[in-house]
Image (spheres, rainbow, N blue to C red):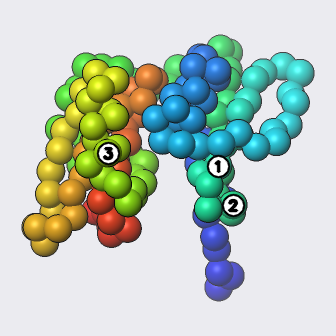
């Protein structure tokens, strides 16, 4: 069997600029070159230090069937995210990151793994996509 590597994760949105700005400002993503599609907008983003994995933000096709309602869009609290769909990241300065989220007024759910060392914060992006940031590289894998 061939060895696979993760290439990208795609998020669809009605507002490419708003969602890209969130990932840049809150999570530190950087824009990279992306295709110029005449019919719709896209933004390709990468985290510094992870050149092989991208986040593709793609304008939602209004003619396509509506997407299932995202957990955050339906008013679900971040406390439901540990067992729902989410993207997870790790950060060296967990406390600094958490302080920044709270300063933005972001609704968060915090928990600690049973090991007592791995701290996690769950929250939503502006489109209701679930996100997790953990204090180490282990997360909830």
Marks 3 and 1: CB-CB under 8 Å? no
- Say whether marks 2 and 1 touch (CB < 8 Å): yes
Question: Residue sitting at 75 percent across and 23 percent down?
Answer: 41
Q: Nearer the viewer, residue 27 or 13?
A: 27
User: Percent x, y for residue 114?
Assistant: 10, 67
Can residue 16 be seen here? The reply is yes
Which numbered dot is residue 51? 2
Q: Secondary structure at mark 1?
A: strand
Mark 1 Cα shell of 10 Å, populated few (<14), some (14-19), many (≥20)? many
Residue marked by disc 1: 46
Question: Which residue is denoted by mark 3 in the rendering?
Answer: 96
**Quick one: 99 or 33, which is closer to the camera?**
99
**In this rendering, position of residue 105 left or right of residue 92:** left
Question: How far apart are labels 3 and 1 at the CA level?
Answer: 21 Å
* Residues at marks 2 and 1, CA–CA distance in whole angstroms: 7 Å
Q: Nearer the viewer, residue 41 or 63?
A: 41
Provide residue 30's location: percent of width, then percent of height: 65, 42
Q: Residue at x 84, y 19 (%)?
A: 39
Single out the mark in the foreground, 3 or 1.
3
Q: Nearer the viewer, residue 69 or 45?
A: 45
- The answer to which of marks 3 and 2 sits earlier in the sequence is 2
Q: Is residue 138 left or right of residue 9?
A: left
Q: Earlier in the sequence, mark 2 or mark 1?
A: 1
In the image, taking residue 54 as reference, residue 35 lies left or right, namely: right
Residue 70, horizontal then vertical, whole percent: 38, 28
Total tally of numbered discs in the picture: 3
């Amino acid at each position: 069997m061939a060895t696979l590597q993760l290439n990208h994760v795609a998020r669809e949105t009605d507002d490419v600029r708003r969602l890209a700005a969130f990932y840049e400002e809150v999570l530190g993503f950087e824009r990279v070159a992306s295709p110029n599609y005449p019919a719709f907008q896209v933004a390709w983003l990468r985290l510094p230090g992870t050149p092989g994995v991208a986040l593709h933000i793609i304008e939602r096709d209004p003619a396509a069937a509506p997407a299932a309602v995202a957990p955050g869009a339906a008013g679900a609290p971040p406390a439901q995210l540990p067992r729902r769909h989410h993207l997870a990241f790790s950060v060296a300065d967990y406390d600094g990151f958490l302080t920044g989220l709270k300063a933005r007024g972001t609704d968060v759910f915090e928990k600690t793994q049973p090991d007592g060392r791995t701290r996690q914060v769950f929250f939503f992006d502006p489109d209701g996509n679930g996100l997790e940031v953990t204090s180490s590289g282990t997360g909830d894998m």
